[in-house]
Amino acid sequence: MIKRYQGSRLRSGRYSEAGRIYHVTTVTNARYPFFSDCDLASLVCRTILWSDRSGATSTLCYVLMPDHLHWLFQLGDGESLSRAMLRVKGRSGRLCGSAVWQKGYHDHAVRKEESIRDVARYIVANPLRAGLVSSLRDYPYWNAAWL
């Protein structure tokens, strides 16, 4: 018996709320380290800025790892989470010249009782935990609103 992917069940409970803060993680196709290439990584970072300038998102922080992205942002007015992610992944994929992203993403709506700064610290510390750098100042593909 072949087991079907249960992703639609996971998505059925998803609720998108304008103005809400989300922590989203999305990975590259086959976890290939596309973003070890500084040109491709820069394109994704610029796409996040583009999303903010369009009003779809307001980034609190992000870190782009070689094979995935962690992004903490507030969703813009009139924007849905799925639409914002479709725009960012679609545009960055086109700019990179390939289908760099896997379908889907993991999202977490930050609850009122959670510390946004603690979530942000967790996100930007990813290159340290992965052993890519010994100091965050040595990792180029991250940003935080508190700087």
Image (spheres, grey):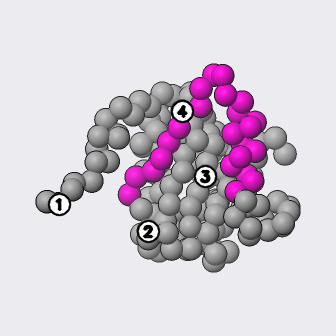
Residue 60: x and y in percent read 69, 41
Give the residue number, with chain letter if any, for mark 4: 109
Residue type pointed to by label 3: His
Q: Which residues are magenta?
A: 103-126
Mark 2 / mark 1, whichever is N-terminal: 1
Q: Residues within 10 Å of mark 2 (few under 14, many from 20)?
A: some
Residue 5: x and y in percent read 27, 53
Mark 4 / mark 2, whichever is N-terminal: 2
Q: Residues within 10 Å of mark 1 (few under 14, many from 20)?
A: few
Front-most of residues 44 and 113:
113
Find out whether residue 109 is within the magenta segment: yes
Q: Dot 4 lies on which element?
A: strand
Q: CA distance from mark 4 to mark 3?
A: 13 Å
Q: CA distance from mark 1 to mark 3?
A: 32 Å
Q: Mark 4–mark 3 contact, CB under 8 Å?
A: no
Q: Dot 2 lies on which element?
A: helix
Give the residue number, with chain letter if any, for mark 2: 29
**Is 110 situated above or below 11?**
above
Q: Dot 1 lies on which element?
A: loop
Q: Mark 2–mark 1 contact, CB under 8 Å?
A: no
Q: Mark 1–mark 4 contact, CB under 8 Å?
A: no
Front-most of residues 103 and 45:
103
Q: Residues within 10 Å of mark 3 (few under 14, many from 20)?
A: many
